Image: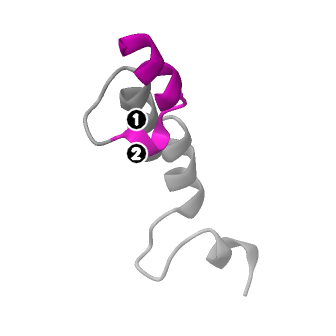
Amino acid sequence: MNNNEEKFTSAGTDINEVKRKNAASGLSYNEVKEMLARSGGQGTAVYSDTNSNEVKKGNQ
């Protein structure tokens, strides 16, 4: 396989171009979920760094 063939998929997609566009496209799906968790999104507790015991103490 020569260098030119390694840059394209069998369908002719330029792999390096896709990687470049992905890198410049903004936040990833997981980064958005983490950002929502930190700002109060619903169902995102797994991404939160809030100590629930401290919150419970503060609410009492």
Q: Nearer the viewer, residue 33 or 60?
A: 60
Q: Where is residue 35? Give x, y as percent.
A: 43, 28
Q: Could one spot residue 42 in this view of the protein?
A: yes
Q: Which amino acid does label 1 sit on?
A: Val
Report if residue 23 lies within the magenta region: no
Residue 27 drawn at (x, y percent): 46, 34
Decide: few, some or many residues near mark 1? Use Cα within 10 Å; few <14, some 14-19, many ≥20: few
Q: Find the magenta span and give its range.
A: 44-60
> On the image, numbered disc 1 is attached to which residue?
32
Q: Residue 46, labelled with which disc?
A: none
Up-down relation of residue 18 to residue 8 (above or below): above
Instruction: Kindly identify the residue that appears in the image at 44 percent across and 12 percent down.
Output: 58
Q: Say left or right for 19 vs 48.
A: right
The answer to the question of whether label 2 and label 1 lie on touching residues, with beta carbons closer than 8 A, is yes
State the SS at label 2: helix
Q: Which of 24 and 55 is in front in this view?
A: 55
Q: Does the magenta stretch include residue 55?
A: yes
Residue 19 appears at what percent x and percent y? Answer: 56, 52
Q: What residue type is labelled 2?
A: Tyr
Q: In this view, does 48 lie above or below 3?
A: above
Q: Which residue is drawn at 74% across and 73% down?
A: 3
Question: Which secondary structure type mostly characterizes the magenta part of the structure?
Answer: helix
Task: Decide if residue 28 is in sight here.
Answer: no
Mark seen at residue 29: 2
Label 1: state its secondary structure.
Answer: helix
Considering depth in this image, is 25 or 17 the residue closer to the camera?
25
For residue 17, side relative to residue 45 (left or right) = right
Task: Examine the image and state in which quarter residue 5 appears.
Answer: bottom right
Q: Which quadrant does the C terminus fall into?
A: top left
59 relative to 11, above or below: above
Task: Find residue 40 and report its horizontal and vertical position in percent.
Answer: 32, 23
Q: For the view shown, which residue lies furthest in the right direction?
A: 2
